[in-house]
Image (spheres, rainbow, N blue to C red):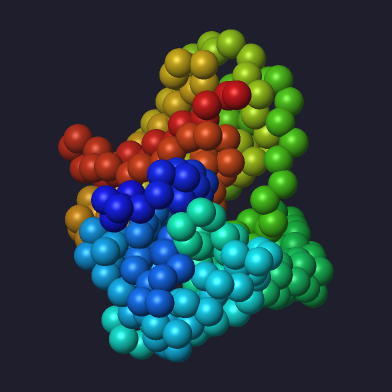
């Protein structure tokens, strides 16, 4: 926090406390100015530069009126008003000379005014993001009901034809191709649905080997005929608090991604490793596919950034979300000898 040397200590202390309270906020900072006829900004704390466009060191000691579209008079009137009673109102503040809507929550302190300035444009963006997330979740629910269920019926019918149908070799090959295409669509739908799903954890004490082994078995059964093999090494770990469904989802996405990468080079071995890490665990899935360009690897966990020719680019974004829900991390690195290694950690707390 920067402060003017002549400012009353009580005012400085309250501004500093408010600044610490809002230090991690994107939309609010603490301000204090005096109640003189020509008000001076005495202190500023928190993410001042993000809100007002300049660091506190450049603002403190300068006329407080430079922060308000109403200038010196607005700063003086607000200090006088909050000296009588706390003030909560919306005002236009200035950032780089440009006005933006803000909410001011002020109280009078010996020597001036202290309070919070909240950038309402950030709040509006947050509301818009929440509305978009809600709409995406509704759309995903609609997709699950109207598309995924009928698609499962088509998949079963194609599998039945492939196994028991009396068809020529060319027709059987076409059925097999259609079945793989349906499987790809199903994977894309699942990624969209998982990405849109609101965060909801049900942590229970469990052995993480169980959900990981289930995910490996599911993906391995799907890719066995494509020449993709899995080599799981699941070390014993102490029971830890995890959401088994979410851990299984993360492991399945990583295994599915590795299987696709392996298929692009004609098949190969996918190595799945689970090992203890502090009070939690670390899951690594290594594929023998083509190495990723550095720019793709750096953006791999950003939504809608595909790392392969096909895909939504949501799979690794979902994995990162699940890792963070469990107090962990996720990263993607080159695999020695070619391919890549995706690693996710779970704190187990």
Q: Residue at x 81, y 69 (%)?
A: 145
Question: How far from the left and from the top, in percent, is residue 321?
Answer: 53, 48
Q: Is residue 143 visible?
A: no
| Residue in view at x 27 percent, y 51 percent | 5
On screen, residue 125 versus residue 145, left or right, reads: left
Identify which residue, 89 or 188, lies in the foreground: 89
Image quadrant where residue 103 sits: bottom right
Q: Position of residue 53 (x, y in %)?
A: 31, 72
Is 349 on the left-hand or right-hand side of 278? right
Compared with residue 307, is residue 63 higher up or lower down, i.e. above or below?
below
Q: Toward the viewer: 131 or 92?
A: 92
- Quadrant of the rendering where the C terminus is positioned: top right
Say which residue appears at 33% left-offset and 80% top-offset: 66
Furthest-front residue in this view: 37
Q: How many marks?
A: 0
Q: Depth check: 332 or 130 in front?
A: 130
Give 61 or 59, whichever is nearer the viewer.
61
Q: Is residue 286 above or below residue 185?
A: above
**Would you say residue 9 is visible in this rendering?**
yes
Picture quarter containing residue 250?
top right
233 horizontally vs 296: left or right? right
- Residue 246: image location, x then y, percent: 64, 41
Is 48 above or below relative to 280? below
Q: Report the residue at 58% width, 41% height from top.
A: 325
Horizontal and vertical percent for residue 166?
71, 64
Instruction: Say which quarter of the image contains residue 272.
Output: top left
In the figure, 121 relative to 198: above or below? below
């Amino acid at each position: 926090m920067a402060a003017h040397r002549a400012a009353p200590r009580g005012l400085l202390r309250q501004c500093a406390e408010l600044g610490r309270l809002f230090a991690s906020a994107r939309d609010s900072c603490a301000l204090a100015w005096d109640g003189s006829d020509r008000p001076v900004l005495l202190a500023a704390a928190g993410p001042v530069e993000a809100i007002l466009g300049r660091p506190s060191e450049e603002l403190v000691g300068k006329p407080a009126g430079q922060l308000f579209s109403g200038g010196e008079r607005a700063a003086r009137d607000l200090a006088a008003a909050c000296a009588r009673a706390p003030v909560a109102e919306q005002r236009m503040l200035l950032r780089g000379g440009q006005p933006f809507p803000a909410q001011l929550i002020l109280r009078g302190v010996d020597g001036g005014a202290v309070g919070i300035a909240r950038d309402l444009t950030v709040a509006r963006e947050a509301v818009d993001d929440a509305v978009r997330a809600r709409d995406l979740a509704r759309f995903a629910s609609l997709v699950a009901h109207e598309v995924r269920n009928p698609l499962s019926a088509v998949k079963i019918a194609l599998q039945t034809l492939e196994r028991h149908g009396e068809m020529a070799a060319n027709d059987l090959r076409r059925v097999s191709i259609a079945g793989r295409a349906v499987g790809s669509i199903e994977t894309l739908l699942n990624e969209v649905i998982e990405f849109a799903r609101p965060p909801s954890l049900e942590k229970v004490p469990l052995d993480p080997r169980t959900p990981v082994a289930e995910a490996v078995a599911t993906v391995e059964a799907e890719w066995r005929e494509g020449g993709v093999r899995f080599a799981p090494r699941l070390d014993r770990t102490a029971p830890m608090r995890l959401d088994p469904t979410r851990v299984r989802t993360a492991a399945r996405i990583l295994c599915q991604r590795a299987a696709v990468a392996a298929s692009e080079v004609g098949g190969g071995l996918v190595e799945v490793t689970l090992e203890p890490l502090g009070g939690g665990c670390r899951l690594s899935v290594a594929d023998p596919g083509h190495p990723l360009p550095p720019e793709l690897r750096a953006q791999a966990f950003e939504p809608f950034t595909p790392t392969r020719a096909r895909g939504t680019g949501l799979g690794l974004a979902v994995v990162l979300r699940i890792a963070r829900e469990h107090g962990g991390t996720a990263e993607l690195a080159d695999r020695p000898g070619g391919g890549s290694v995706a690693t996710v950690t779970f704190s187990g707390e």
